[in-house]
Amino acid sequence: MREISPALHMSCEEFLAISPNARAHAERIRAQKLAGIRPVPSPSLLDYSTVLQPVIRANLIDKVASLVDENLFGRSEMCHQFAILVSRALSNLGLNAKTIAGTAMYYENGCEIFRWKHYWVRCGAEIIDGNSDILFENPKVPKNIIAPPYWGPVKLIPPERRLRPSNEIVAPDPDVDNIWWNELDIWLNGQSGPR
């Protein structure tokens, strides 16, 4: 099982040695990985897209989720890498897709309850915010936030979530470039049938 440390220039075990309170969370995720029961986004995906076939969309976001889930603490803070990979995959399939940086804001009963820096994909008139199903694993995120992954028109984004783009230029990611993109590209080339 490959694991990627959340800290540059430090192995996973070195990171856990200086963060002993995080070990229980990491071990729970490790056990789920070994058992093959890590969550994937497709079961809760709000899919209103007209891009590609539904099964291709679901398989794509699940594949990307499985790649970025190699972080020691899972994928709850991997929206940057998730969005870059989905964007590259869609571009590879001939679509005009772009990774967007900005702020995600979450609401309950019309009141904002949480916001943070976030990344998603813009593909024509559609948004792909596919990594949000795992927010419950992140200790920074309030437990009452429910934000199913979304793929569809901007105008249909659930009212409990707002995505505000910034002017930030999305930086490349070394794990995306050196590890995950090669694997995703091979996977994409192995997919057959109409897209």
Image: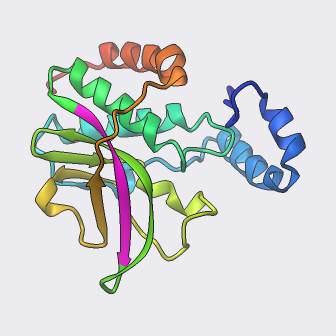
**Is residue 95 shown left or right of residue 171?**
left
Q: Nearer the viewer, residue 85 or 173?
A: 173
Give residue 56's quadrant in the image. Answer: top left
The x, y position of residue 44, in whole percent, is 36, 58
Does the magenta segment cover residue 101?
A: yes
Quadrant location of the N terminus? top right
The x, y position of residue 150, in whole percent, is 28, 54
Q: Nearer the viewer, residue 146 or 59?
A: 146
Residue 153, placed above or below residue 5: below
Secondary structure mostly seen in magenta is strand
Seen at 30% across and 84% down, the residue is 110
The x, y position of residue 166, in whole percent, is 30, 48
**Is residue 62 shown left or right of residue 134?**
left
Seen at 59% across and 58% down, the residue is 138
Seen at 20% across and 42% down, the residue is 54
Residue that protrudes farthest toward the bottom in the picture: 109
Magenta region: 98-107
**Is residue 149 shown left or right of residue 140?**
left
Residue 4 seen: yes
